[in-house]
Image (cartoon, coloured by chain):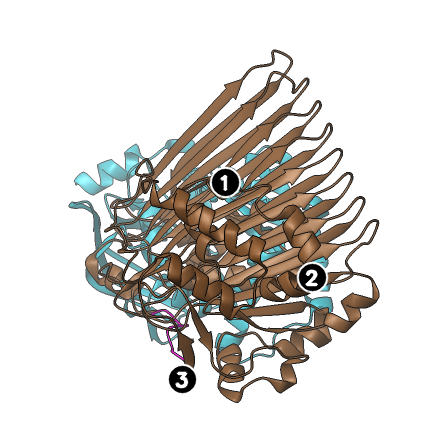
Amino acid sequence: MAYEGDDLLEEVTGKEYEFGFTTNIESDKAPPGLNEDIIRLISSKKNEPEWLLEWRLDAFAKWSEMQEPEWAHVNYEKPDFQSISYYSAPKKKPQLDSLDDLDPEMRATMDKLGISIEEQKRLSGVAVDFVMDSVSVATSFKKKLGELGIIFCSMSEAVQEHPELVKKYLGTVVPKQDNFYAALNSAVFTDGSFCYIPKGVRCPMELSTYFRINESGTGQFERTLVVADKGSYVSYLEGCTAPQRDENQLHAAVVELIALDEAEIKYSTVQNWYPGDKNGAGGVFNFVTKRGLCETRSKISWTQVETGSAVTWKYPSCILKGDHSIGEFYSVAVTNNYQQADTGTKMIHIGKNTNSTIISKGISAGKSQNSYRGLVSINASAKNARNFSQCDSLLMTDRCGAHTFPYIEVNNSSAKVEHEATTSKIGEDQIFYCLQRGLNEEQAISLIVNGYAKDVLNKLPMEFAVEAQKLLAISLEGSVG
Amino acid sequence: MKPLLSINNLQAEVEGHEILKGLNLTINPGEVHAIMGPNGSGKSTLASVLAGNEDYDVTGGSVDFDGIDLLDIDASERAKEGLFLAFQYPVEIPGVSNINFLRAALKEIHEHKEIDPLTAKEFLAKVKEKSALVELDGKLTNRSVNEGFSGGEKKRNEIFQMAMLEPKMAILDETDSGLDIDALRIVAQGVNAMRSPERSFLLITHYQRLLDYIVPDFVHVLYKGQIVKSGPKELALELEEKGYDWIKEEMAL
């Protein structure tokens, strides 16, 4: 048949990972291994208050008794947690007032990542926080946001400057013993972003964090906390890249969102960690816990475009605690070559008249495995709760897998829960139709896949939707077979 | 005159079955040719092979298209060189708007011809003009490609795309099938508006009815993978009246 054959599959890999460079920045790195002393070291390096050290030590004690979960539909060699370095920071002065003061090497890194800060500033006014090897190196636009009372800074800075807010909210949505990776993160997190939007304030620009793992043999354990106070609104975006390395790198992040009464948080992710090479060597293990808490009439919306990582284990969730609160999850997950993704969401309905929507679009290519795993839980208290779920899978080859594991628990008879699912293979007739109109095969695939994922891409902020579309096309080049 | 398309002894098979068995056909610029023939004679195979569908294997012969060895280039290149196929069964592409699809296609074709791309304003003016040719509703031009279109709308959309892309040569593969009289008239009106001294058409059809609206210069009968009879437009009327049996009998002699 027309688009089969190994030669085409060879071409798949023609497009290598674009962000696989390393940056020669001197770093201050802790010796490998994990014990109480390392945690004390991290805490003292960051000049943390005593309560936070205690919190970390408690998390470590709980983690030490936990087992790495095995229920996900993924297969990988478990990381040796004693061979990882848990603290690595660029040596040069990390705290800057403006990106203009940035180390030129670091600046070059950001340019390579396509973070044209200047342009973004000019065109869209995006405030960016850049986290490299777990340490936040620069936050732009701080002054402008400050005038509105918005706090947007690195987590370490928040611990110093706003300890009362951090103490009040940290670990309230993802408790430190929540799961194995969350407990690990709670013990050793080195930085991340913190954001607080005061009552009634509508954040006038997109807030954005770029994460990058640079050092070899380090893990990245960032912690993000977003608090939207009553009646406020914020749109937040994170992007991720890592250098190309033979070993597997570990990324175990925790993101907590808190939407107080009538607040709205829109959280978008474009995840492009290094996926490993075409034979499945190397790549990032992306084990992330993301969860949001919705109070009365509030709304949390997760949008994710996942194209990277060797193994992804991630379920951005919403706890719909307040009456009339809304949770949304829009996801496009692409796997190619030997990538494995087990991703989805949990919508926990507690309040009355709560409403959740799940749109998941999986795209599998090469020999990859792509699973949707989701839970819709309607508690007895959640009168008139509504859920709509749609889980579609698109197969690019006949050697990949798409799996759907939906769990639905309903404990209130007034609830309405709908679930739709489809699986399809990319049509050779669709590709031929596009070719006959003058498009080439890459353009045809890009067009068809972007059409398929449109319902999700439309949810991204405009400037990132364009980036996400390109990323989809790159991830799938020549992958039909 | 230099022919636009010249097919010499073309042989092709699909999944090991020989369908085209030495087909010859020459089309000059500006001419309209109709190919008729009984079911299974190879009409749609000819359209697919000319358009470059790789499900079909060309096993012999040659095709020259405006000085280019057509069989040497892929489907996308053929389209860019100005060969258009109106599909018998137009394909749906969910989530991709008709307009964006055409914008992307036109951009490629213009780039290939080294013509400056149209501005958004010019492009939209062209959409308006060409969609009017086939009375295609503005809503349809903005919807996903062929998704949820009726049979007639899909065929009209094919002619609309043809009008937008302005090919040198258009092959219409049973564009009249499944159309009511009104839709047939609209499709024909679109095609006739596109006729010019440079542009040629190859109409593949079962019915003489289409040829009442689009009057061909030549009619050919395809039978068992070869063109066995050619004539002026009156040949179509004769076929309508007498069927194909007399041709089969002539062949047997």
Indicate the position of residue B4 as horizontal and vertical percent values: 41, 69
In front: label 2 or label 3? 3
Q: Earlier in the sequence, mark 2 or mark 1?
A: 2
For disc 3, the neighbor class at 10 Å (few under 14, some 14 to 19, many from 20) is few
| Farthest bottom residue in view | A104
Residue type indicated by callout 3: Asn
Q: Quadrant of residue A348?
A: top right
Q: Nearer the viewer, residue B226 or B48?
A: B48
Q: Residue at x 56, y 15 (%)?
A: A411
Q: Earlier in the sequence, mark 2 or mark 3?
A: 3
Q: Left of A205 or right of it: where is A332?
A: left
Residue type indicated by callout 1: Ser
In front: label 2 or label 1? 2
Residue A438 lies, with reference to residue A291, above or below; the image says below
What span is in magenta? Answer: A16-24
Question: Among the chains, which one is cyan?
Answer: B
For disc 2, the neighbor class at 10 Å (few under 14, some 14 to 19, many from 20) is some
Question: Among the chains, which one is brown?
Answer: A
Q: Secondary structure at mark 2?
A: loop
Cα distance in 3D space between marks 2 and 3: 30 Å
Cα distance in 3D space between marks 3 and 1: 39 Å
* Residue identifier under label 3: A24
Q: Left of A477 or right of it: where is A5?
A: left
